[in-house]
Image: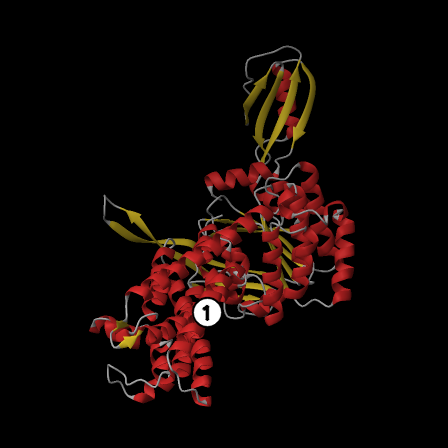
Amino acid sequence: MLGIYRRLVGARIRSQLQYRLSFWLNLVGTALITFLDFAAILVLFHQVDALGEWTVAEVGVLYGISCVSFALADMIFGHLDQLPQMIRMGDFDQVLVRPVGSLLQVIATDFALRRLGKLTQGLIVLAVALAHANVSWTAGRAAMLAVAIVAGCVIFAGIWVGLSTVVFWLIDSHETVNAFTYGGNFLAQYPINIFGSWLRRLVIYLIPLAFTAYFPALYILDKEDPLGFPRALQFLSPMVAAATCVVGWALWRNAVRRYRSVGS
Amino acid sequence: MIELDGVEKTFSVRVKRGRLRRERRELRAVDGISFRVDAGELVGYVGPNGAGKSTTVKMLTGILVPSGGRISVAGLDPARRRIQLARRIGVVFGQRVQLWWDLPLHDSFELLRHIYRVPYERWRANLDRFSDVLDLEPFLETPVRQLSLGQRMRGELTAAMLHDPEILFLDEPTIGLDVVAKVRVREFLAEVNRERNVTVLLTTHDLADIERLCSRLLIIDHGRVIYDGTIERLIERYGKERTLVVDLEDPAPPLKVDGARVVRVEGARQWLRFRRDEVTAARLTAAVAERAPLVDLTVEEPDIEDVVRRIYAEGLG
Protein backbone atom coordinates (compact mmCIF):
# COMPACT_ATOMS: atom_id res chain seq x y z
CA MET A 1 0.00 0.00 0.00
CA LEU A 2 2.83 2.33 0.89
CA GLY A 3 4.53 1.31 -2.34
CA ILE A 4 1.53 2.33 -4.40
CA TYR A 5 1.25 5.60 -2.51
CA ARG A 6 4.89 6.35 -3.20
CA ARG A 7 4.48 5.58 -6.89
CA LEU A 8 1.33 7.66 -7.31
CA VAL A 9 2.90 10.58 -5.52
CA GLY A 10 6.06 10.17 -7.58
CA ALA A 11 3.97 10.35 -10.75
CA ARG A 12 2.35 13.50 -9.47
CA ILE A 13 5.67 15.16 -8.73
CA ARG A 14 6.97 14.23 -12.18
CA SER A 15 3.79 15.71 -13.65
CA GLN A 16 4.36 18.94 -11.77
CA LEU A 17 7.92 19.09 -12.98
CA GLN A 18 6.53 19.12 -16.51
CA TYR A 19 5.61 22.71 -15.81
CA ARG A 20 8.96 23.82 -14.43
CA LEU A 21 8.45 27.54 -14.20
CA SER A 22 5.11 27.17 -12.45
CA PHE A 23 6.64 24.66 -10.03
CA TRP A 24 9.43 27.03 -9.02
CA LEU A 25 7.19 30.07 -8.80
CA ASN A 26 4.91 28.07 -6.56
CA LEU A 27 7.81 27.10 -4.33
CA VAL A 28 9.10 30.66 -4.08
CA GLY A 29 5.60 31.99 -3.37
CA THR A 30 5.03 29.45 -0.61
CA ALA A 31 8.39 30.24 0.97
CA LEU A 32 7.46 33.91 1.04
CA ILE A 33 4.08 33.30 2.61
CA THR A 34 5.59 31.02 5.22
CA PHE A 35 8.09 33.71 6.14
CA LEU A 36 5.31 36.28 6.51
CA ASP A 37 3.32 33.87 8.70
CA PHE A 38 6.31 33.46 10.91
CA ALA A 39 6.88 37.21 11.15
CA ALA A 40 3.26 37.63 12.20
CA ILE A 41 3.75 35.26 15.11
CA LEU A 42 6.88 37.09 16.24
CA VAL A 43 5.00 40.37 16.21
CA LEU A 44 2.13 38.87 18.15
CA PHE A 45 4.43 37.38 20.77
CA HIS A 46 6.22 40.68 21.21
CA GLN A 47 3.01 42.45 22.13
CA VAL A 48 1.48 39.97 24.54
CA ASP A 49 2.92 38.53 27.74
CA ALA A 50 0.34 36.01 28.74
CA LEU A 51 -2.84 34.49 27.37
CA GLY A 52 -5.35 33.05 29.82
CA GLU A 53 -2.87 31.97 32.50
CA TRP A 54 -0.43 30.74 29.88
CA THR A 55 2.92 32.42 29.42
CA VAL A 56 4.06 33.30 25.94
CA ALA A 57 6.50 30.38 25.91
CA GLU A 58 3.74 27.99 26.95
CA VAL A 59 1.46 29.26 24.24
CA GLY A 60 4.40 28.76 21.89
CA VAL A 61 4.57 25.07 22.87
CA LEU A 62 0.87 24.71 22.22
CA TYR A 63 1.17 26.53 18.93
CA GLY A 64 4.21 24.51 17.91
CA ILE A 65 2.66 21.11 18.59
CA SER A 66 -0.51 22.05 16.78
CA CYS A 67 1.39 23.54 13.88
CA VAL A 68 3.67 20.54 13.39
CA SER A 69 0.92 17.96 13.54
CA PHE A 70 -1.30 20.04 11.29
CA ALA A 71 1.49 20.54 8.77
CA LEU A 72 2.13 16.79 8.66
CA ALA A 73 -1.55 16.04 8.18
CA ASP A 74 -1.81 18.76 5.57
CA MET A 75 1.17 17.41 3.66
CA ILE A 76 -0.32 13.92 3.42
CA PHE A 77 -4.08 14.56 3.39
CA GLY A 78 -4.19 18.13 2.14
CA HIS A 79 -5.20 16.96 -1.29
CA LEU A 80 -8.60 16.05 -0.11
CA ASP A 81 -9.38 19.59 -1.21
CA GLN A 82 -9.18 18.28 -4.79
CA LEU A 83 -12.11 16.02 -4.07
CA PRO A 84 -14.92 18.44 -5.00
CA GLN A 85 -13.26 19.01 -8.35
CA MET A 86 -12.82 15.26 -8.90
CA ILE A 87 -16.43 14.63 -8.07
CA ARG A 88 -17.80 17.46 -10.13
CA MET A 89 -15.84 16.42 -13.21
CA GLY A 90 -16.64 12.75 -12.70
CA ASP A 91 -12.96 11.90 -12.35
CA PHE A 92 -13.81 10.03 -9.20
CA ASP A 93 -15.17 7.29 -11.49
CA GLN A 94 -11.72 6.11 -12.42
CA VAL A 95 -10.64 6.04 -8.81
CA LEU A 96 -13.38 3.50 -8.25
CA VAL A 97 -12.39 1.16 -11.08
CA ARG A 98 -8.87 0.66 -9.79
CA PRO A 99 -7.95 -2.08 -7.34
CA VAL A 100 -6.66 0.32 -4.70
CA GLY A 101 -8.56 1.98 -1.85
CA SER A 102 -10.33 5.14 -2.93
CA LEU A 103 -9.09 7.28 -0.05
CA LEU A 104 -5.50 6.27 -0.71
CA GLN A 105 -5.85 7.24 -4.35
CA VAL A 106 -7.37 10.60 -3.56
CA ILE A 107 -4.71 11.60 -1.05
CA ALA A 108 -2.01 10.33 -3.39
CA THR A 109 -3.06 12.87 -6.02
CA ASP A 110 -0.36 14.99 -4.45
CA PHE A 111 2.21 15.13 -1.72
CA ALA A 112 2.50 18.80 -0.94
CA LEU A 113 6.25 19.26 -0.74
CA ARG A 114 5.71 22.99 -0.69
CA ARG A 115 4.02 22.62 2.67
CA LEU A 116 7.39 21.68 4.12
CA GLY A 117 7.70 25.38 4.87
CA LYS A 118 4.80 25.24 7.30
CA LEU A 119 6.33 22.22 9.00
CA THR A 120 9.71 23.92 9.39
CA GLN A 121 8.03 26.97 10.83
CA GLY A 122 6.17 24.85 13.37
CA LEU A 123 9.31 22.96 14.36
CA ILE A 124 11.24 26.19 14.93
CA VAL A 125 8.48 27.71 17.06
CA LEU A 126 8.19 24.48 19.03
CA ALA A 127 11.94 24.27 19.66
CA VAL A 128 12.26 27.90 20.71
CA ALA A 129 9.17 27.74 22.91
CA LEU A 130 10.28 24.52 24.61
CA ALA A 131 13.66 26.09 25.36
CA HIS A 132 11.98 29.04 27.07
CA ALA A 133 9.22 27.20 28.89
CA ASN A 134 11.36 25.63 31.61
CA VAL A 135 10.21 22.11 30.91
CA SER A 136 11.60 19.59 33.39
CA TRP A 137 12.19 16.81 30.91
CA THR A 138 11.47 13.20 31.74
CA ALA A 139 11.22 10.21 29.42
CA GLY A 140 7.47 10.40 29.85
CA ARG A 141 7.28 14.03 28.75
CA ALA A 142 9.52 13.46 25.75
CA ALA A 143 7.39 10.49 24.74
CA MET A 144 4.26 12.58 25.22
CA LEU A 145 5.63 15.17 22.81
CA ALA A 146 6.13 12.55 20.10
CA VAL A 147 2.78 10.91 20.82
CA ALA A 148 1.02 14.28 20.76
CA ILE A 149 2.42 15.13 17.36
CA VAL A 150 1.49 11.79 15.82
CA ALA A 151 -1.91 11.66 17.49
CA GLY A 152 -2.54 15.28 16.52
CA CYS A 153 -1.70 14.52 12.91
CA VAL A 154 -4.08 11.56 12.96
CA ILE A 155 -6.85 13.60 14.60
CA PHE A 156 -6.54 16.37 12.02
CA ALA A 157 -6.51 13.80 9.23
CA GLY A 158 -9.53 11.98 10.62
CA ILE A 159 -11.50 15.20 10.99
CA TRP A 160 -10.50 16.22 7.51
CA VAL A 161 -11.55 12.94 5.93
CA GLY A 162 -14.82 12.95 7.83
CA LEU A 163 -15.66 16.50 6.85
CA SER A 164 -14.60 16.10 3.25
CA THR A 165 -17.37 13.55 2.75
CA VAL A 166 -19.78 16.48 2.79
CA VAL A 167 -18.80 17.08 -0.84
CA PHE A 168 -20.45 13.82 -1.88
CA TRP A 169 -23.74 15.51 -1.05
CA LEU A 170 -22.95 19.14 -1.71
CA ILE A 171 -20.72 19.46 -4.70
CA ASP A 172 -19.38 22.92 -4.06
CA SER A 173 -18.73 22.72 -0.40
CA HIS A 174 -14.98 22.69 -0.16
CA GLU A 175 -15.02 26.15 1.37
CA THR A 176 -17.04 24.70 4.22
CA VAL A 177 -14.47 21.98 4.68
CA ASN A 178 -11.61 24.46 4.60
CA ALA A 179 -13.31 26.58 7.22
CA PHE A 180 -13.36 23.57 9.52
CA THR A 181 -9.86 22.36 8.87
CA TYR A 182 -7.93 25.60 8.67
CA GLY A 183 -10.23 27.06 11.29
CA GLY A 184 -9.58 23.94 13.35
CA ASN A 185 -5.87 24.47 13.14
CA PHE A 186 -6.40 28.03 14.31
CA LEU A 187 -8.47 26.90 17.29
CA ALA A 188 -5.98 24.23 18.28
CA GLN A 189 -3.20 26.80 18.48
CA TYR A 190 -4.71 28.59 21.44
CA PRO A 191 -5.26 27.49 25.02
CA ILE A 192 -8.89 26.40 25.04
CA ASN A 193 -9.60 28.02 28.39
CA ILE A 194 -9.66 31.39 26.63
CA PHE A 195 -12.65 30.29 24.54
CA GLY A 196 -16.28 30.60 25.48
CA SER A 197 -17.84 27.50 26.97
CA TRP A 198 -19.77 26.34 23.86
CA LEU A 199 -16.68 26.54 21.71
CA ARG A 200 -14.74 24.69 24.38
CA ARG A 201 -17.30 21.89 24.44
CA LEU A 202 -17.17 21.71 20.67
CA VAL A 203 -13.40 21.19 20.56
CA ILE A 204 -13.41 18.67 23.39
CA TYR A 205 -16.41 16.50 22.65
CA LEU A 206 -17.47 16.91 19.06
CA ILE A 207 -14.44 17.79 16.98
CA PRO A 208 -11.73 16.72 19.38
CA LEU A 209 -9.18 19.42 18.67
CA ALA A 210 -8.39 19.88 22.36
CA PHE A 211 -6.61 16.53 22.22
CA THR A 212 -4.20 17.59 19.51
CA ALA A 213 -2.28 20.10 21.60
CA TYR A 214 -4.05 21.41 24.68
CA PHE A 215 -4.17 18.30 26.85
CA PRO A 216 -0.73 16.94 25.85
CA ALA A 217 0.80 20.37 26.41
CA LEU A 218 -0.63 20.47 29.95
CA TYR A 219 1.23 17.24 30.68
CA ILE A 220 4.50 18.28 29.07
CA LEU A 221 4.47 21.63 30.88
CA ASP A 222 3.26 20.02 34.10
CA LYS A 223 0.53 22.63 34.34
CA GLU A 224 -2.59 22.66 36.42
CA ASP A 225 -5.53 22.56 34.02
CA PRO A 226 -7.17 26.00 34.34
CA LEU A 227 -10.44 24.28 33.46
CA GLY A 228 -10.00 21.57 36.07
CA PHE A 229 -10.53 18.57 33.78
CA PRO A 230 -9.28 15.26 35.17
CA ARG A 231 -5.61 14.53 34.49
CA ALA A 232 -6.55 11.28 32.76
CA LEU A 233 -7.70 13.27 29.75
CA GLN A 234 -4.08 14.22 29.10
CA PHE A 235 -3.29 10.62 28.19
CA LEU A 236 -6.29 10.07 25.96
CA SER A 237 -4.94 11.58 22.74
CA PRO A 238 -3.99 8.25 21.09
CA MET A 239 -7.42 6.80 21.88
CA VAL A 240 -9.14 9.91 20.62
CA ALA A 241 -7.00 9.73 17.48
CA ALA A 242 -8.02 6.12 16.91
CA ALA A 243 -11.67 6.99 17.40
CA THR A 244 -11.45 9.95 15.03
CA CYS A 245 -9.92 7.65 12.44
CA VAL A 246 -12.69 5.09 12.80
CA VAL A 247 -15.37 7.74 12.48
CA GLY A 248 -13.64 9.43 9.53
CA TRP A 249 -13.20 6.12 7.75
CA ALA A 250 -16.81 5.07 8.37
CA LEU A 251 -18.08 8.38 7.01
CA TRP A 252 -15.85 7.99 3.95
CA ARG A 253 -17.05 4.46 3.19
CA ASN A 254 -20.63 5.48 3.57
CA ALA A 255 -20.13 8.51 1.33
CA VAL A 256 -18.45 6.52 -1.44
CA ARG A 257 -21.43 4.20 -1.56
CA ARG A 258 -23.56 7.24 -2.19
CA TYR A 259 -21.40 8.60 -4.97
CA ARG A 260 -23.63 9.57 -7.89
CA SER A 261 -21.13 10.11 -10.65
CA VAL A 262 -22.06 12.49 -13.47
CA GLY A 263 -24.08 12.08 -16.61
CA SER A 264 -22.53 10.78 -19.86
CA MET B 1 -20.07 -13.87 -16.53
CA ILE B 2 -22.36 -10.90 -16.11
CA GLU B 3 -25.79 -11.26 -14.57
CA LEU B 4 -28.36 -8.61 -13.82
CA ASP B 5 -31.63 -9.36 -12.15
CA GLY B 6 -34.22 -6.62 -11.86
CA VAL B 7 -31.58 -3.95 -11.42
CA GLU B 8 -32.78 -0.44 -10.64
CA LYS B 9 -31.14 2.88 -10.08
CA THR B 10 -33.02 5.93 -8.97
CA PHE B 11 -31.54 9.33 -8.38
CA SER B 12 -33.30 11.97 -6.40
CA VAL B 13 -32.97 15.32 -8.08
CA ARG B 14 -34.03 18.73 -6.90
CA VAL B 15 -36.13 20.58 -9.37
CA LYS B 16 -36.45 24.33 -9.20
CA ARG B 17 -39.95 25.53 -8.55
CA GLY B 18 -40.02 29.25 -8.21
CA ARG B 19 -37.24 31.37 -6.83
CA LEU B 20 -36.42 29.50 -3.66
CA ARG B 21 -38.62 26.48 -3.61
CA ARG B 22 -37.15 23.25 -4.73
CA GLU B 23 -38.86 19.96 -5.01
CA ARG B 24 -37.35 16.54 -4.66
CA ARG B 25 -38.14 14.23 -7.51
CA GLU B 26 -37.24 10.62 -8.14
CA LEU B 27 -35.56 9.93 -11.42
CA ARG B 28 -35.48 6.35 -12.58
CA ALA B 29 -32.35 6.02 -14.67
CA VAL B 30 -32.49 2.24 -14.74
CA ASP B 31 -35.86 0.66 -14.23
CA GLY B 32 -35.63 -3.08 -13.73
CA ILE B 33 -33.02 -4.45 -16.11
CA SER B 34 -32.33 -8.17 -16.32
CA PHE B 35 -29.99 -9.93 -18.70
CA ARG B 36 -27.03 -12.22 -18.69
CA VAL B 37 -23.85 -12.34 -20.70
CA ASP B 38 -21.84 -15.54 -20.96
CA ALA B 39 -18.07 -15.81 -21.02
CA GLY B 40 -16.57 -14.93 -24.38
CA GLU B 41 -19.57 -13.01 -25.70
CA LEU B 42 -19.18 -9.65 -27.38
CA VAL B 43 -22.32 -7.71 -26.65
CA GLY B 44 -23.39 -4.31 -27.89
CA TYR B 45 -25.41 -2.17 -25.53
CA VAL B 46 -27.20 0.65 -27.29
CA GLY B 47 -29.91 3.15 -26.63
CA PRO B 48 -30.62 6.84 -27.11
CA ASN B 49 -28.98 9.45 -24.87
CA GLY B 50 -30.25 9.22 -21.33
CA ALA B 51 -31.56 5.68 -21.77
CA GLY B 52 -29.50 4.40 -18.85
CA LYS B 53 -26.55 2.83 -20.68
CA SER B 54 -23.77 4.54 -18.77
CA THR B 55 -25.59 4.14 -15.50
CA THR B 56 -25.75 0.38 -16.11
CA VAL B 57 -22.06 0.19 -16.94
CA LYS B 58 -21.23 2.21 -13.84
CA MET B 59 -23.21 -0.20 -11.70
CA LEU B 60 -21.53 -3.21 -13.33
CA THR B 61 -18.08 -1.77 -12.62
CA GLY B 62 -18.86 -0.89 -9.01
CA ILE B 63 -18.86 2.88 -9.44
CA LEU B 64 -22.52 3.25 -8.59
CA VAL B 65 -24.44 1.21 -6.09
CA PRO B 66 -27.77 -0.01 -7.49
CA SER B 67 -30.95 1.03 -5.71
CA GLY B 68 -32.52 -2.35 -6.27
CA GLY B 69 -32.04 -5.75 -7.86
CA ARG B 70 -29.04 -8.03 -7.97
CA ILE B 71 -25.82 -7.81 -9.98
CA SER B 72 -23.09 -10.37 -10.34
CA VAL B 73 -19.97 -9.75 -12.40
CA ALA B 74 -17.37 -12.51 -12.57
CA GLY B 75 -19.21 -14.03 -9.63
CA LEU B 76 -18.82 -10.89 -7.49
CA ASP B 77 -21.20 -8.22 -6.29
CA PRO B 78 -19.58 -5.09 -7.78
CA ALA B 79 -20.66 -2.68 -5.06
CA ARG B 80 -19.39 -4.87 -2.22
CA ARG B 81 -16.32 -6.38 -3.85
CA ARG B 82 -15.24 -3.35 -5.82
CA ILE B 83 -11.49 -3.73 -5.33
CA GLN B 84 -11.44 -7.47 -5.98
CA LEU B 85 -13.54 -6.94 -9.07
CA ALA B 86 -11.30 -4.15 -10.32
CA ARG B 87 -8.47 -6.65 -10.80
CA ARG B 88 -10.60 -8.81 -13.05
CA ILE B 89 -12.19 -6.22 -15.30
CA GLY B 90 -10.94 -3.58 -17.67
CA VAL B 91 -12.84 -0.32 -18.14
CA VAL B 92 -12.63 2.29 -20.87
CA PHE B 93 -14.71 5.46 -20.81
CA GLY B 94 -14.54 7.15 -24.19
CA GLN B 95 -15.11 10.56 -22.71
CA ARG B 96 -12.66 10.34 -19.84
CA VAL B 97 -8.94 10.10 -19.58
CA GLN B 98 -7.69 7.38 -17.30
CA LEU B 99 -4.06 7.81 -18.24
CA TRP B 100 -1.84 10.27 -16.41
CA TRP B 101 -2.37 13.45 -18.37
CA ASP B 102 1.08 15.02 -18.00
CA LEU B 103 3.21 11.90 -18.13
CA PRO B 104 4.49 9.94 -21.11
CA LEU B 105 2.18 7.10 -22.13
CA HIS B 106 4.76 4.54 -21.07
CA ASP B 107 4.79 5.90 -17.49
CA SER B 108 1.05 5.34 -17.21
CA PHE B 109 1.52 1.70 -18.22
CA GLU B 110 4.32 1.37 -15.69
CA LEU B 111 2.13 2.83 -12.92
CA LEU B 112 -0.72 0.51 -13.84
CA ARG B 113 1.64 -2.45 -13.57
CA HIS B 114 2.15 -1.59 -9.91
CA ILE B 115 -1.43 -0.65 -9.21
CA TYR B 116 -2.70 -3.96 -10.59
CA ARG B 117 0.38 -5.88 -9.39
CA VAL B 118 0.92 -7.50 -12.76
CA PRO B 119 4.01 -9.76 -12.84
CA TYR B 120 6.70 -8.07 -14.91
CA GLU B 121 7.02 -10.72 -17.64
CA ARG B 122 3.27 -10.89 -18.14
CA TRP B 123 3.04 -7.11 -18.30
CA ARG B 124 5.95 -6.86 -20.75
CA ALA B 125 4.47 -9.52 -23.01
CA ASN B 126 1.07 -7.82 -23.01
CA LEU B 127 2.53 -4.41 -23.67
CA ASP B 128 4.64 -5.72 -26.56
CA ARG B 129 1.66 -7.45 -28.08
CA PHE B 130 -0.66 -4.45 -27.77
CA SER B 131 1.84 -1.92 -28.98
CA ASP B 132 2.26 -4.16 -32.00
CA VAL B 133 -1.43 -4.42 -32.76
CA LEU B 134 -2.21 -0.79 -31.97
CA ASP B 135 1.08 0.60 -33.24
CA LEU B 136 1.91 2.48 -30.05
CA GLU B 137 5.68 2.56 -30.54
CA PRO B 138 5.88 6.02 -32.16
CA PHE B 139 4.26 7.81 -29.22
CA LEU B 140 5.09 5.70 -26.17
CA GLU B 141 7.31 8.46 -24.82
CA THR B 142 4.93 11.34 -25.60
CA PRO B 143 3.01 12.97 -22.73
CA VAL B 144 -0.62 11.94 -22.89
CA ARG B 145 -1.85 15.53 -23.21
CA GLN B 146 -0.04 15.82 -26.54
CA LEU B 147 -1.58 12.72 -28.08
CA SER B 148 -4.32 12.89 -30.68
CA LEU B 149 -7.69 11.50 -29.67
CA GLY B 150 -7.09 8.35 -31.71
CA GLN B 151 -3.66 7.78 -30.20
CA ARG B 152 -5.01 8.36 -26.75
CA MET B 153 -7.81 5.89 -27.22
CA ARG B 154 -5.30 3.26 -28.32
CA GLY B 155 -3.42 4.03 -25.12
CA GLU B 156 -6.60 3.72 -23.05
CA LEU B 157 -7.41 0.34 -24.57
CA THR B 158 -3.94 -0.93 -23.79
CA ALA B 159 -4.18 0.43 -20.26
CA ALA B 160 -7.44 -1.42 -19.72
CA MET B 161 -6.01 -4.73 -20.96
CA LEU B 162 -2.56 -4.87 -19.34
CA HIS B 163 -3.73 -6.81 -16.30
CA ASP B 164 -5.45 -9.54 -18.35
CA PRO B 165 -9.03 -8.75 -17.38
CA GLU B 166 -11.69 -11.37 -17.98
CA ILE B 167 -14.27 -8.76 -18.86
CA LEU B 168 -13.86 -5.51 -20.71
CA PHE B 169 -16.42 -2.72 -20.31
CA LEU B 170 -16.32 0.04 -22.88
CA ASP B 171 -18.48 3.15 -22.76
CA GLU B 172 -18.47 4.77 -26.19
CA PRO B 173 -14.89 3.84 -27.09
CA THR B 174 -15.16 5.15 -30.63
CA ILE B 175 -16.70 8.52 -29.85
CA GLY B 176 -15.05 11.33 -31.80
CA LEU B 177 -12.65 9.04 -33.65
CA ASP B 178 -12.06 9.18 -37.40
CA VAL B 179 -12.86 6.22 -39.61
CA VAL B 180 -9.34 4.79 -39.58
CA ALA B 181 -9.05 4.99 -35.82
CA LYS B 182 -12.48 3.42 -35.40
CA VAL B 183 -11.46 0.47 -37.55
CA ARG B 184 -8.34 0.02 -35.42
CA VAL B 185 -10.32 0.01 -32.21
CA ARG B 186 -12.77 -2.52 -33.62
CA GLU B 187 -10.00 -4.81 -34.82
CA PHE B 188 -8.40 -4.67 -31.42
CA LEU B 189 -11.62 -5.54 -29.64
CA ALA B 190 -12.34 -8.38 -32.03
CA GLU B 191 -8.87 -9.74 -31.43
CA VAL B 192 -8.92 -9.68 -27.63
CA ASN B 193 -12.36 -11.25 -27.71
CA ARG B 194 -11.29 -13.99 -30.10
CA GLU B 195 -7.79 -14.73 -28.90
CA ARG B 196 -7.99 -14.06 -25.20
CA ASN B 197 -11.63 -15.01 -24.79
CA VAL B 198 -12.33 -11.69 -23.09
CA THR B 199 -16.03 -10.99 -22.55
CA VAL B 200 -16.82 -7.55 -23.94
CA LEU B 201 -19.73 -5.26 -23.19
CA LEU B 202 -19.73 -2.17 -25.32
CA THR B 203 -21.99 0.85 -25.40
CA THR B 204 -21.94 2.96 -28.51
CA HIS B 205 -23.86 5.34 -30.68
CA ASP B 206 -22.07 4.13 -33.75
CA LEU B 207 -24.05 1.20 -35.01
CA ALA B 208 -21.27 0.28 -37.37
CA ASP B 209 -19.35 -0.78 -34.25
CA ILE B 210 -22.15 -3.17 -33.44
CA GLU B 211 -22.51 -4.46 -36.96
CA ARG B 212 -18.82 -5.25 -37.32
CA LEU B 213 -18.27 -6.62 -33.85
CA CYS B 214 -21.19 -7.84 -31.90
CA SER B 215 -22.96 -11.13 -32.14
CA ARG B 216 -25.60 -9.87 -29.80
CA LEU B 217 -27.35 -6.59 -29.30
CA LEU B 218 -29.16 -5.19 -26.28
CA ILE B 219 -31.27 -2.10 -26.84
CA ILE B 220 -32.42 -0.15 -23.85
CA ASP B 221 -34.69 2.83 -23.57
CA HIS B 222 -36.19 4.60 -20.57
CA GLY B 223 -34.17 2.34 -18.30
CA ARG B 224 -35.56 -0.94 -19.69
CA VAL B 225 -34.26 -3.56 -22.09
CA ILE B 226 -36.47 -3.39 -25.16
CA TYR B 227 -34.57 -5.79 -27.38
CA ASP B 228 -32.13 -8.61 -26.73
CA GLY B 229 -30.96 -10.75 -29.63
CA THR B 230 -28.92 -10.93 -32.81
CA ILE B 231 -28.71 -8.12 -35.30
CA GLU B 232 -30.08 -10.33 -38.09
CA ARG B 233 -33.17 -11.14 -36.13
CA LEU B 234 -33.66 -7.48 -35.28
CA ILE B 235 -33.60 -6.51 -38.92
CA GLU B 236 -35.77 -9.42 -39.90
CA ARG B 237 -38.38 -8.60 -37.31
CA TYR B 238 -38.39 -4.87 -37.29
CA GLY B 239 -36.81 -4.00 -40.59
CA LYS B 240 -39.65 -5.14 -42.78
CA GLU B 241 -39.38 -2.13 -45.01
CA ARG B 242 -37.12 -2.47 -48.02
CA THR B 243 -36.47 0.21 -50.58
CA LEU B 244 -36.64 -0.10 -54.34
CA VAL B 245 -34.46 2.44 -56.09
CA VAL B 246 -35.45 2.98 -59.72
CA ASP B 247 -33.78 5.01 -62.46
CA LEU B 248 -36.36 6.18 -64.96
CA GLU B 249 -35.64 7.39 -68.47
CA ASP B 250 -36.89 10.87 -67.71
CA PRO B 251 -37.61 12.79 -64.51
CA ALA B 252 -41.18 12.14 -63.48
CA PRO B 253 -43.55 13.11 -60.69
CA PRO B 254 -43.56 10.65 -57.78
CA LEU B 255 -44.95 7.36 -58.99
CA LYS B 256 -48.21 6.08 -57.61
CA VAL B 257 -47.92 2.33 -57.05
CA ASP B 258 -49.98 0.08 -54.75
CA GLY B 259 -48.14 -1.22 -51.69
CA ALA B 260 -45.28 1.30 -51.89
CA ARG B 261 -44.70 4.97 -51.30
CA VAL B 262 -42.11 7.26 -52.78
CA VAL B 263 -39.84 8.59 -50.07
CA ARG B 264 -37.36 10.49 -52.16
CA VAL B 265 -37.00 11.86 -55.69
CA GLU B 266 -33.77 13.03 -57.22
CA GLY B 267 -33.92 13.85 -60.93
CA ALA B 268 -34.87 10.66 -62.71
CA ARG B 269 -34.19 8.51 -59.64
CA GLN B 270 -36.91 7.59 -57.18
CA TRP B 271 -36.90 5.70 -53.88
CA LEU B 272 -39.94 3.55 -53.16
CA ARG B 273 -40.39 2.04 -49.73
CA PHE B 274 -42.41 -1.13 -49.36
CA ARG B 275 -43.05 -3.86 -46.84
CA ARG B 276 -41.70 -7.27 -47.70
CA ASP B 277 -44.76 -9.00 -46.34
CA GLU B 278 -47.16 -6.98 -48.46
CA VAL B 279 -45.59 -6.91 -51.86
CA THR B 280 -42.64 -8.59 -53.58
CA ALA B 281 -39.87 -6.68 -55.29
CA ALA B 282 -40.74 -8.37 -58.58
CA ARG B 283 -44.40 -7.31 -58.44
CA LEU B 284 -43.40 -3.78 -57.59
CA THR B 285 -40.86 -3.61 -60.39
CA ALA B 286 -43.47 -4.73 -62.86
CA ALA B 287 -45.90 -2.12 -61.56
CA VAL B 288 -43.30 0.61 -61.91
CA ALA B 289 -42.38 -0.48 -65.42
CA GLU B 290 -46.06 -0.19 -66.44
CA ARG B 291 -46.08 3.47 -65.47
CA ALA B 292 -42.71 4.71 -66.72
CA PRO B 293 -39.81 3.38 -68.81
CA LEU B 294 -37.21 1.84 -66.47
CA VAL B 295 -33.46 2.08 -66.99
CA ASP B 296 -32.06 0.49 -63.87
CA LEU B 297 -33.05 -0.68 -60.40
CA THR B 298 -31.67 -1.87 -57.07
CA VAL B 299 -33.27 -3.15 -53.90
CA GLU B 300 -31.91 -1.79 -50.64
CA GLU B 301 -32.22 -3.89 -47.52
CA PRO B 302 -33.01 -2.00 -44.33
CA ASP B 303 -29.86 -1.27 -42.42
CA ILE B 304 -29.46 -1.46 -38.71
CA GLU B 305 -29.19 2.29 -38.44
CA ASP B 306 -32.71 2.70 -39.84
CA VAL B 307 -34.14 0.01 -37.69
CA VAL B 308 -32.68 1.33 -34.49
CA ARG B 309 -33.63 4.88 -35.33
CA ARG B 310 -37.19 3.76 -35.82
CA ILE B 311 -37.21 1.81 -32.60
CA TYR B 312 -35.95 4.84 -30.68
CA ALA B 313 -38.58 7.03 -32.29
CA GLU B 314 -41.57 4.71 -32.24
CA GLY B 315 -40.84 1.97 -29.78
CA LEU B 316 -41.20 -1.64 -30.73
CA GLY B 317 -44.92 -1.33 -31.40
Which image quarter is the N terminus of chain A in? bottom right
SS type, badge 1: helix
Q: Residue furthest top?
A: B250
Residue B226 coordinates in the image, percent (x, y): 50, 50
Q: Would residue A157 be seen by someone viewing this image from the given angle? A: no
Q: Nearer the viewer, residue A79 or B174?
A: A79
Residue B270 vertical placement versus A130 (above, below): above
The answer to whether B179 appears left or right of A42 in the picture is right
Q: Nearer the viewer, residue B3 or A253?
A: A253
Q: Would residue B149 be seen by someone viewing this image from the given angle? A: yes
Residue B108 coordinates in the image, percent (x, y): 66, 56
Q: Please report the residue visible at 68 percent of the width from the left and 57 percent of the height from the top.
A: B109
Q: Hey, what amino acid is under mark 1?
A: Ile
- Give the total of numbered labels: 1
Q: Which residue is mark 1?
A: A124
Q: Residues within 10 Å of mark 1 (few under 14, many from 20)?
A: some
Figure colour scheme: secondary structure
Q: Please report the residue visible at 39 percent of the width from the left and 70 percent of the height from the top.
A: A159
Res. B294 image quadrant: top right
Residue A204 coordinates in the image, percent (x, y): 30, 77
Q: Nearer the viewer, residue A159 or B309?
A: A159
Q: Nearer the viewer, residue A172 or B249?
A: A172
Residue B63 vertical placement versus B276 (above, below): below
Res. A242 image quadrant: bottom left
Q: Please report the residue visible at 33 percent of the width from the left and 77 percent of the height from the top.
A: A214
Residue B286 coordinates in the image, percent (x, y): 65, 22
The answer to whether A114 appears left or right of B183 in the picture is left
Residue A9 vertical placement versus B96 (above, below): below
Q: Chain of mark 1?
A: A
Res. B3 image quadrant: bottom right
